């Protein structure tokens, strides 16, 4: 078996063995499996869990998830309230046309 996959599997097994209250275990599993680099995420989680830091790790992850929700919500409200507002780093800029009465000839 691939050693990287083994690291991820060991971490997921440890998370399951901790029998964390719902949804803590699911959040940590998602952090590992959905990460851009699952092996790095697995190592990070394993390091934190090996020090008995499960509760703190879960609270950190909940804070990150909640912060992301708040930012998305704020951005959506800003965009809704200000149609000309653009999110930073948008792939395609929005182009607004001037009303015909204001357009220069």
Image (cartoon, rainbow, N blue to C red):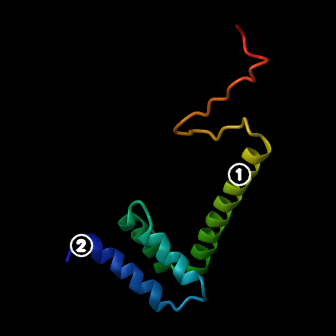
Residue at the outermost front position = 100
Report the residue that reaches farthest toward the top.
105
In which quadrant of the rendered image does the C terminus lie? Answer: top right
Instruction: Indicate whether 28 appears above or below 41.
Output: below
Name the spot of residue 88 as percent of width and height, x first: 61, 39
The residue that appears at 44% across and 64% down in the rendered structure is 35
Q: Which numbered disc covers residue 85?
A: none
Q: CA distance from mark 2 to mark 1?
A: 42 Å
Q: Could you tell me which residue is drawn at 39 percent across and 86 percent down?
A: 13
46 vs 31, nearest the viewer: 31
Q: Are marks 2 and 1 in contact (CB under 8 Å)?
A: no
Which quarter of the rendering shows the N terminus?
Answer: bottom left
**Residue 93 sits in which quadrant?**
top right
Across and down, in percent, residue 104 comes to 72, 10
Tag 2 secondary structure: helix
Q: Which residue is mark 2?
A: 3
Residue 100 at x, y = what percent?
Answer: 74, 20
Left or right, residue 104 beside residue 47: right
> Which residue: 46% across, 84% down?
15
Residue that carries the numbered disc 1 in the rendered image: 76
Q: Which residue is farthest left?
A: 1
């Amino acid at each position: 078996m691939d050693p990287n996959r083994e690291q991820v599997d060991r971490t997921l097994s440890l998370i399951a063995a901790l029998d964390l209250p719902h949804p803590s275990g699911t959040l940590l599993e998602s952090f590992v499996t959905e990460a851009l680099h699952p092996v790095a995420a697995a190592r990070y989680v394993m390091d934190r869990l090996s020090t008995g830091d499960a509760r703190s790790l879960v609270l950190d992850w909940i804070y990150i998830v909640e912060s992301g929700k708040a930012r998305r919500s704020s951005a959506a409200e800003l965009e809704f309230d200000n149609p000309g507002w653009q999110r930073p780093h948008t792939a395609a800029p929005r182009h607004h046309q001037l009303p015909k009465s204001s357009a220069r000839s």
